[in-house]
Image: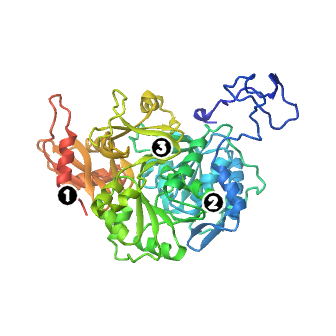
Amino acid sequence: MNHFFRRRSSLSAPCFFNGSKKVQPFENSRHVCEIPENLEANSWEGLVRCAANYAPLTPITFLDRAAKVYRDRTSVVYGSFKCTWEQTRLRCVKLASSLTRLGISRGDVVATLAPNIPAMQELHFAVPMAGAVICTLNTRHDSSMISVLLQHSDAKIIFVDYQFLHIAQGAFNHLSETKAKLPILVLIPEHINPSPTNSDHHIYEYETLLDSGDSEFTTIRPKTEWDPISVNYTSGTTSRPKGVVYNHRGAYLNALASNSIHGMSSLPVYLWTVPMFHCNGWCLIWGLAALGGTNICLRHVSPKEIFDSIDQNKVTHMGGAPTVLNMIINSSDQSPLPHKVDIMTGGAPPPPSILSRIEELGFRVSHLYGLTETFGPGTSCVWKPTWDSLPRSEQLKLKARQGVEHYGLEEVDVRDPVTMKSVPNDGATIGEIMFRGNTVMSGYLKDVKATTEAFSGGWFHSGDLAVKHEDGYIEVKDRLKDIVISGGENISTVEVETVLYHHPAVLEAAVVARPDNHWGQTPCAFVKVKEGFEVSPEEIISFCRDHLPHYMAPRTVVFEDLPKTSTGKIQKFILREKAKAMGSLF
């Protein structure tokens, strides 16, 4: 068992409570009762905590209920493939059984490398039903990064979609060079029909593996709500990746809260344009089961696929970064919607012009904000009826705010990171956005220092700078850590700069965000070239793409002397203004 995931039960020694005396449980008792903690026996006689009134919260239960309440309701649609909720639960139970037969036990990590397909929905339930922890890897990573994350997470198995098999194989080659133990590979094929299992004993086929499972398997529940359910990796340098650990309690609560901020009621039809690997699909994979919703899966996101899916499947809700919104409004495939579709957007605040044009097509847009460390969405810009009478331009500005916390969190505030005092609600004083509550991560995997820093002062520090308006709504003003948000994904400028400094012609380098009409933002590199060297922007970009995932490579390179303070620190705020003045890329 992974040492990180060993957890001590928070409950006291098992006993029954009889009046004011503790007595031992019956020897053949399956479920024991306990005195609730922090209660005085004499003043609260008769209270017990037992199987009749207590169970650790876990989103696994949403699937069990969906299979009963919505048994014949369509759970997932992927092309011609469809499953009901009853069928989905059966498949998940068998898959969980198969995982245990492969040696997976409580606390083991199971990784995935796949797009938005039914297998990803099933694995989000099956892996924790086997007592394990799911680790959904970003499909935009290259083999080198995947190998680092597999080794860091100690993944025992990786489920790989056929489209990314070459990436996984490249990662395995990297691991072999370091003599690291290779995880078992399960291939997810293009079609649902089973194909022969590979002769290599380390490679299995998804459907064949699933079919071999026991339909009567007893699923494993968490011992405590604190037990980990998933690991999500943020952007970070290859030497120090950050694995954000979610627990069952947080996943349960955030799934329900995400349903709420998406405005979902019973039986929604959700179109998957948000990557399921990103913050576990904002916890909506679990949340949709609670509502008996239907998952419409798309392998490739395109305007035509979006409009066709909305029309054919009667989609009611979807999500997406400003990239997706911009792709829709600039597509020749756009057409008036047959009905209103609620769309949630996150990442960089969408420009008012994009919000206006997307709503003209029939979409109803809401804005949310969060981080990987907050299980995805943590706040939303809850619309106020009083805003209905405001001019359209003012409404669009208000809609782009990050808003207020959802009910799964205890509190979200903007505070001075030094004094830890809350900033005034004046819309001008800048502070750092901070969170606390049940839907904040358990911590960073194997990184005590980073976890301690993130929770300094009893709050989770987001690293984002914002103001609070008079009504308490927050509005992000800058990124404290200079993160570039491109297509909804965070890009570490430090990691890009590290690669730039490896180029033989680069003397100094700094990376900031440049506005982009398609991606929201893209990396812009300011470079000072060594004396006697000549290099073109195209060469710099090509060099970065050879050493980074393409989405992390700069789209713009500017050659000039870099502005510095008297101590030699590069003044990035000046470079950000220059990048902004260049205008948006198309």
Q: Residue at x 71, y 22 (%)?
A: 40
In the picture, the disc for residue 314 is: none
User: How far separated are the C-alphas under marks 1 and 3?
Assistant: 32 Å
Question: Which residue is label 1 attached to?
Answer: 583
User: How far separated are the C-alphas under marks 3 and 2?
Assistant: 31 Å
CB within 8 Å, label 1 to label 3: no
Q: Is residue 255 left or right of residue 142?
A: right
Decide which of 449, 550 is in the foreground and name it: 449
Q: Residue at x 17, y 28 (%)?
A: 567
Decide which of 89, 255 is in the foreground and name it: 255
State the SS at label 2. Answer: helix
Q: Dot 2, crowdedness within 10 Å: few (<14), some or many (≥20)? A: many
Quadrant (top left/top right/bottom left/bottom right) for the C terminus: bottom left
Q: Dot 1, crowdedness within 10 Å: few (<14), some or many (≥20)? A: few
Total numbered labels: 3
**In front: mark 1 or mark 3?**
3
Question: Which residue is label 2 attached to?
Answer: 206
In the picture, the disc for residue 374 is: 3
Q: Quadrant of residue 391?
A: bottom left
From this view, report whether residue 399 is shown above or below residue 416. below
